[in-house]
Image: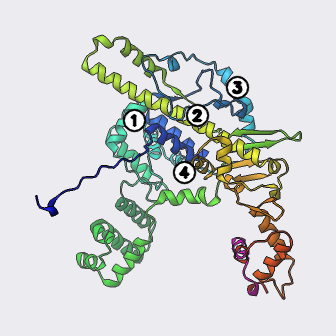
Amino acid sequence: MPQGSRQIQAQTQQQVQTLSPQQILAVKLLELPSIELEDRVRAELLENPALEEGKEDTPDNDYADNDPDTQTESPEDGGDTDYDSLGDYLTEDDIPDYKLQENNRSRDDRAEEIPFSDTTSFYETLKEQLGEHDLTEHQRQLAEYLIGSLDDDGLLRKSLDSISDELAIYAGIEATPQELEQALHVVQSFDPPGLGAQSLQECLLIQIRRKMEQQPDNADLSLLKAEEAIVQECYDEFTRKHWDKIQQKLGMDESLCQQAIREVCKLNPRPGASMGEAIGKNMQQIVPDFIVDTYDDGTINLSLNNRNVPELRMNRDFTQMLEEHTKNRANQSKESKEAMMFLKQKIDAAQGFIDAVKQRQNTLLTTMQAIIDLQRPFFLEGDESLLRPMILKDVAERTGLDISTISRVSNSKYVQTNYGIYPLKFFFSDGYTTESGEEMSVREIRHILKECIDSEDKKKPYTDDELTEMLKQKGYPIARRTVAKYRQQMNIPVARLRK
């Protein structure tokens, strides 16, 4: 064999770490703030019939009590489930209503003190508009389900056939696609125009036709008809910006065509998103994930804000059906085996989701408690200058958790304290060691730098070199470029611009 045609095979070995689906689920839930967790839990309740809302009657059900002193460990991988012995979720008894009310009374009373924004949600606003229409109870149920099926941008991307199947399976409501189409027309009449459209093209046409209904001026009506023709007959050309082809295809006057195209470009392709911004997002609504109360005796109490997150448990009907199939395993037909596999999969997914939610709660409490321990002086006094240098590694070492886990917890999470609501990132900052060996927070150094600048003569402001010397005299021998960086972080201009 010629030398050049030889193939050299090399065998290499490398270690690749892969996450199990349960671990991926736990990570995704960990990243969610409480307001998004509520939506995720409710979506899971709709998707998995083996999961239902309610309180588990188990000895280790301490997560629902929001008590940091009674935390229980949750397995990192979500745990294994033995479906041959269903003791974990077949021994659940009914809990009397008065017991649930009694157990939740103090927690609900406490949660009402949280300063939630009283904005109206997108769903509630559409339901209010639905109440203005004269509909039968059946039509109202269909319209409400369609509203709940809208995407965040206000469009309906599910087919009416699939929605018909969902209603039959999950809500026990029989509805034909034709009945759903009639209910959808009602939803499409809501404001803002374009809601309930099943495509972007339909969304634009709804907005144009709404303007036609409200436009008595014949001159403007001709422009609206030109807009309708462009979207209805030349939609592909419009999306590709082939303006010349549109004009030729419709035989339209050039100025009218250009004006109509400009008007179409002004239409809202995401009517639901714009409505959500107008109602809540522009107000920057913040729902705290943690509640930290500091008392006069120095006691600090930590709790999770799970006020609106439903408690979860296994559906007893599913577990009983699985138990029956398991008992008759020897005489099962092919259909029975397939049914048993379906039940197992749903129960496995439901139990895994419950475990992931519990693991999230445990990780959040553990992380926040470590932050409180490290920044205890601040939580006692509320003085920002008392915050000590703290990085992700400090919290990771104290909790025994990975740095990436601490990062996920601190991202997009807020804590309500006696002194206001703060993002968790507020408590993290780099440290600096002075000449005497004292560790100080960068936040404190910036505070001292700002004091120096505030006290300067505005006719002759300090340069960065002069500020560096002043800090050095105060015991902070940091470089000039560091002074410039801290000044820029505080949005303070250079000396010549401060005159």
Front in this rendered view, residue 120 or 335: 335
Disc 4 to disc 2, C-alpha distance = 29 Å
Residue topped by disc 3: 103
**Residue type pointed to by label 3:** Asn
Residue topped by disc 2: 358
**Residue type pointed to by label 2:** Lys
Q: Is residue 310 visible?
A: yes
Residue topped by disc 1: 167
Q: Earlier in the sequence, mark 4 or mark 3?
A: 3
Side of 198 where 90 appears, left or right: right
**Discs 4, 2 touching: Cβ within 8 Å:** no
Q: Earlier in the sequence, mark 2 or mark 1?
A: 1
Residue topped by disc 4: 122
**Residue at screen point 84% across, 62% down:** 436
Q: Earlier in the sequence, mark 3 or mark 2?
A: 3
**Residue at screen point 28% across, 76% down:** 246
User: In this rendering, is residue 430 above or below 499?
Assistant: above
Side of 181 where 109 appears, left or right: right
Decide: few, some or many residues near mark 2? Use Cα within 10 Å; few <14, some 14-19, many ≥20: many
Front in this rendered view, residue 292 or 162: 292
Q: Nearer the viewer, mark 1 or mark 3?
A: 3
Q: Which residues are magenta?
A: 483-496
**Residue at screen point 80% across, 57% down:** 384
- Residue 494 sits inside the magenta stretch: yes
Q: Nearer the viewer, mark 3 or mark 2?
A: 2
**Discs 4, 3 touching: Cβ within 8 Å:** no
- Residue 478 sits inside the magenta stretch: no
Q: SS class of the residue under badge 3? A: helix
Side of 331 where 368 appears, left or right: right
Front in this rendered view, residue 265 or 373: 373
**Residue type pointed to by label 1:** Leu
Q: Nearer the viewer, mark 4 or mark 2?
A: 2
